[in-house]
Image (cartoon, rainbow, N blue to C red):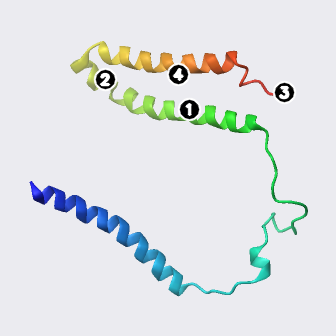
Amino acid sequence: MGNEYLVVVVFILLGIALPAAALTVGRFLRPHRPLKEKAITYESGVDPTGESWVQFNVRYYLFALMFVIFDVETAFLYPWAVSYDLLRSDMGLLILVEMAIFVFFLLLGLMYAWKKKVLEWK
């Protein structure tokens, strides 16, 4: 019983020690020549003008969030569709109903966003 925990502890310690060691070795090996030109904002090779703080329209974030939601939906639907034939023989129609409920709630969220006019660009 204790042996399984030892393996987990070793993996946790390796997961912490290896990146820390790599970052430490990289710090000692890399050249360190701080220059004023290296500290300025890079704008495609053009000298920066004005302030670096720019406010974006909140709709960009809403569209990005909607994309992420439906991208994750696809990530969940694909493995389900691949294993559907195997699972259908064991679980019957239940697996299809579960996925229909999942898609229903996603479509419900999409209809809510549509009703609130989140998807309209003005």
Q: Quadrant of residue 5?
A: bottom left
What residue would you read off at disc 3? 122
Numbered disc in front, either 2 or 3 = 3
Disc 4 marks a residue whose amino acid type is Leu
What residue would you read off at disc 2? 85
Mark 2, Cα crowd under 10 Å, few <14 / some 14-19 / many 20+, is: few
The CA distance from mark 2 to mark 3 is: 45 Å
Which label belongs to residue 33? none
Residue 104 coordinates in the image, percent (x, y): 49, 16
Q: Do the residues labelled 2 and 1 touch (CB within 8 Å)?
A: no
- Residue at the right extreme of this rendering: 49
- First in sequence: mark 1 or mark 3? 1
Q: Quadrant of the N terminus?
A: bottom left
Q: Is mark 4 on a helix, strand or loop?
A: helix
Q: Are marks 4 and 3 in contact (CB under 8 Å)?
A: no
The CA distance from mark 4 to mark 3 is: 25 Å
What residue would you read off at disc 4? 106
What residue would you read off at disc 1? 69
Disc 3 marks a residue whose amino acid type is Lys
Residue 41 coordinates in the image, percent (x, y): 78, 67
Q: Residue at x 81, y 64 (%)?
A: 44
Most foreground residue, 102 or 55:
55
Mark 4, Cα crowd under 10 Å, few <14 / some 14-19 / many 20+, is: some
The CA distance from mark 4 to mark 1 is: 8 Å
Disc 2 marks a residue whose amino acid type is Asp
Q: Quadrant of the C terminus?
A: top right
Q: Do the residues labelled 2 and 3 touch (CB within 8 Å)?
A: no
Q: Is mark 3 on a helix, strand or loop?
A: loop
The CA distance from mark 4 to mark 2 is: 23 Å
Q: Is mark 2 on a helix, strand or loop?
A: helix
Q: Do the residues labelled 4 and 1 touch (CB within 8 Å)?
A: yes
Residue 115 coordinates in the image, percent (x, y): 68, 15
